[in-house]
Structures are given as structure tokens and as C-alpha cells.
Image (cartoon, grey):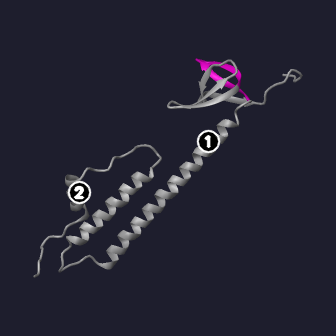
Amino acid sequence: MFIHTTSHTTSADIMQESKQTEKAPKTDTSPLATSEEMDLDRDAFLKILITQLRYQDPMNPMEDKEFIAQMAQFSSLEQMQQMNQSLNTFLEGNFIYQASALIGKEVAVKAGEGEETLGVVKEISFTEEGPMVILDDGKEYPMQDIVGISAVRSEGDDG
């Protein structure tokens, strides 16, 4: 038995069909991609590729070059995602290290309109609004409001 189709099914057609039949993967605006999200992308790509192979025109099958190019794109995308995840992990660790280096340092912080306050950093807290420095007076300021950092002055230092 021989089946002949006269129209080519494009990747765009397959994407449209998969959107109608399956729930689309969630899009996340955060810079960190979880392994679960990468698996969704990998699965979606493989489903599209299998569907494309299944519905190709037998009289005009996909050329090897096209198949190899798609696999190379997939491999490249996967490597970039892994590199991005590694870089983000490194940057998070580096940021925590830099923030912890402020503990025990005297900082000048914007306290209001044109005002600055000095204090020694006793603690760093990470909140949803971003990292906060907690000074020796107990007040909390956003880390991005720091305008100066210096070593703690001792009683004998001339200032």
C-alpha cells in the first residue's frame, strides 16, 4: 500500500498542531532556566522532529542535510542552555561572596533625598526586593544604595 501526499508539512504547521493538541510549555522571564524547563524544550523538539519525520512526503523525504542541521541546532541549543545555567550558578555564588565581604566594613548609604548615613555592616539579607545591608544601628538599606565602602575606623585613627 502506498500513500502519497501532495503538501509538505512544515515545522510551523507541526508547531501549530502541537499547540492545539497539547498544553504549551510555560515561559519564564527569569534568567535561570531549571532542568525541568530544559527537559520540556528537549521533549518538544524531539516530538516535533518525530512528527516531521512521520508526516513527511514519501516521494520527497527530508534530506539528510536537513536532519543533520536540525540535530546540530538542537545540540548547540542544549549546550548553550547548560553553559547559561553554569554561568548563572557561578554568578550567584560570586555575588554572595562579594556581599559577604561587606560584613564588618563601614559603608556610606543613601538614606534619603541627598542624605547619606554611615554605619558598619553587621549582616546581609537576601529578600525578594534584592539584597539588603543591615547596619550596626539595626536599620536595613538596599545594597544598591551603598555609595562608599571603607575599613572600620578605630579609636586611634586620624580622620
Q: Secondary structure at mark 2?
A: helix
Q: Which quadrant of the rendered structure holds the C terminus?
A: top right
Q: What residue occupies the far right of the structure in this picture?
A: 156
Which residue type carries mark 2?
Ser
Q: Position of residue 42 (x, y in %)?
A: 37, 60
| Residue at point 20%, 79% (across, down) | 60
In the image: residue 51, left or right of residue 88 = left
Question: For the residue marked with disc 1, what is the amino acid?
Answer: Phe
Mark number displayed over residue 83: none
Q: Nearer the viewer, residue 158 or 78?
A: 78
Q: Residue most toward the front?
A: 36
Residue 90 left/right relative to 54: right
Q: Position of residue 38 (x, y in %)?
A: 41, 55
Mark 1 element type: helix
Other residues around mark 1 within 10 Å, as few (<14) / some (14–19) / many (≥20): few
Percent position of residue 94, x then y = 63, 45
| Residue 118 within the segment the image draws in magenta | yes
- Residue 155: give x, y in percent of width and height: 86, 20
Number of numbered discs on residues: 2
Identity of the residue drawn at 66% across and 40% down: 98
In the picture of the structure, the residue carrying the numbered disc 1 is 95
- For label 2, count other residues whose C-alpha is less than 10 Å away and answer few (under 14), some (14-19) or many (20+): some
Residue 58 forms part of the magenta stretch = no
Residue that label 2 marks: 18
Residue 133, relative to residue 4: is it above or below? above
Q: Which quadrant holds residue 40? A: bottom left
Q: Of marks 1 and 2, which one's residue comes earlier in the chain?
A: 2
Q: Is residue 113 above or below residue 106?
A: above
Q: Is residue 39 above or below residue 120?
A: below
Magenta range is 105-120
For the N terminus, the image quarter is: bottom left
Per the model, the C-alpha gap separating discs 1 and 2 is 40 Å
